[in-house]
Image (tube, rainbow, N blue to C red):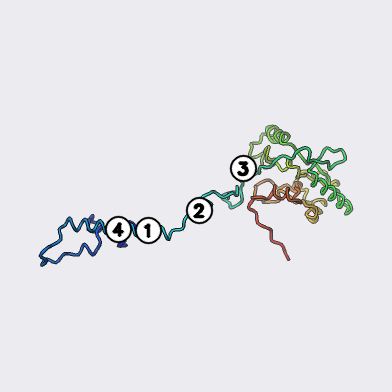
Amino acid sequence: MNKAGFSGKPPNSSGDPGDDIPVALRDTPDVTSKTPLQPLVLLIGGVAGFILLAVVSGFFFSLTTPKKTADSQSPPANPLTTNSSGSPQDNNAVLGHLAYPEAPESELAPITADRRIRMRKTAAEKFRAMTQAARSAGVILVPISGFRSVKEQEQLFFEVGAQRNQTPAQRAALSAPPGHSEHHTGYAVDIGDGTASVTNLQADFDRTKAFGWLQTNAARFGFEMSFPQDNVQGVSYEPWHWRFVGDRQSLEMFYKARNLKPAKTSP
């Protein structure tokens, strides 16, 4: 309902107060009437009519206006927002890297003979099975790095960044800030080709037999590449960095509330 009231007309721009009085009461009285209405009576009647109609109109408006529920007033539970490019962006992200919990020591198992490189138990079991399958196909998958604690990641981010004279934004393109690395989840692993060590942690790893085999077979063992080219997080392309998403806990850790849609596949 507009401010002009029930008449549907805007207020008189000339400032004539008569437009606040219903049309029926603003008709000029019969000059031949013996008891002409006094101006005060006209004014009181007009105001009373206006108030009555305003109350009635407000009543019907309240009946027809949808009520807001508590759920509609609460902010959405999904922590994702959208950046200017339309890509998903987590509210807890730092320089494009998402926050993850650190794996407890009791959940870690070795994936190398010297026991130095470890992953979560389920991921470690699947990784060992994957390397065996690759070897039977003539491909040597070499784990370069697995679990790294948050403390180790802090040193890698700040100290190495200082040595290379990199700003935090520049460093974040190559290494996650502490608390935001997939490595401390125990599900991530950096992989190299045993026959082409010169490509370790390099973009041209994607030209090796190891990478080609991973592209074709890693999903069978629950692994996927974390940072493909043009990834939505804006992290540099890392064809060597793979993460395990083969059970419920790992899947939810990396995908829950990320606002990502299923990928289209051919039937």
Q: How many marks?
A: 4
User: In this orientation, which residue lies closer to the viewer: 85 or 218?
Assistant: 218
Q: Disc 3 or disc 2, which is closer to the eye?
A: 2
| Amino acid under disc 2 | Thr
Circles 1 and 2: CB distance less than 8 Å? Answer: no
Report which residue position mark 3 lands on. 92
Task: Name the quadrant of the C terminus.
Answer: bottom right
Separation (CA) of disc 1 from disc 4: 11 Å
| Amino acid under disc 3 | Asn
Q: Which badge, 3 or 1, is on the more N-terminal residue?
A: 1
Give me the disc on residue 237.
none
| Amino acid under disc 1 | Phe
Separation (CA) of disc 1 from disc 2: 20 Å
Circles 3 and 2: CB distance less than 8 Å? Answer: no
Report which residue position mark 1 lands on. 59
Q: Which badge, 1 or 2, is on the more N-terminal residue?
A: 1
What x and y, as percent, mark residue 214?
80, 52
Separation (CA) of disc 3 from disc 2: 28 Å
Circles 2 and 4: CB distance less than 8 Å? Answer: no
Horizontal side of residue 73 vs 51, given as left or right: right
Q: Secondary structure at mark 2?
A: loop
User: In this orientation, which residue lies closer to the viewer: 254 or 249?
Assistant: 249
Give me the disc on residue 69.
2
Q: Is residue 131 visible?
A: yes
Q: Secondary structure at mark 4?
A: helix
| Amino acid under disc 4 | Leu
Q: Which badge, 4 or 3, is on the more N-terminal residue?
A: 4
Q: Residues within 10 Å of mark 3 (few under 14, many from 20)?
A: some
Give me the disc on residue 52.
4
Q: Residues within 10 Å of mark 1 (few under 14, many from 20)?
A: few
Separation (CA) of disc 4 from disc 3: 54 Å
Q: Secondary structure at mark 3?
A: loop
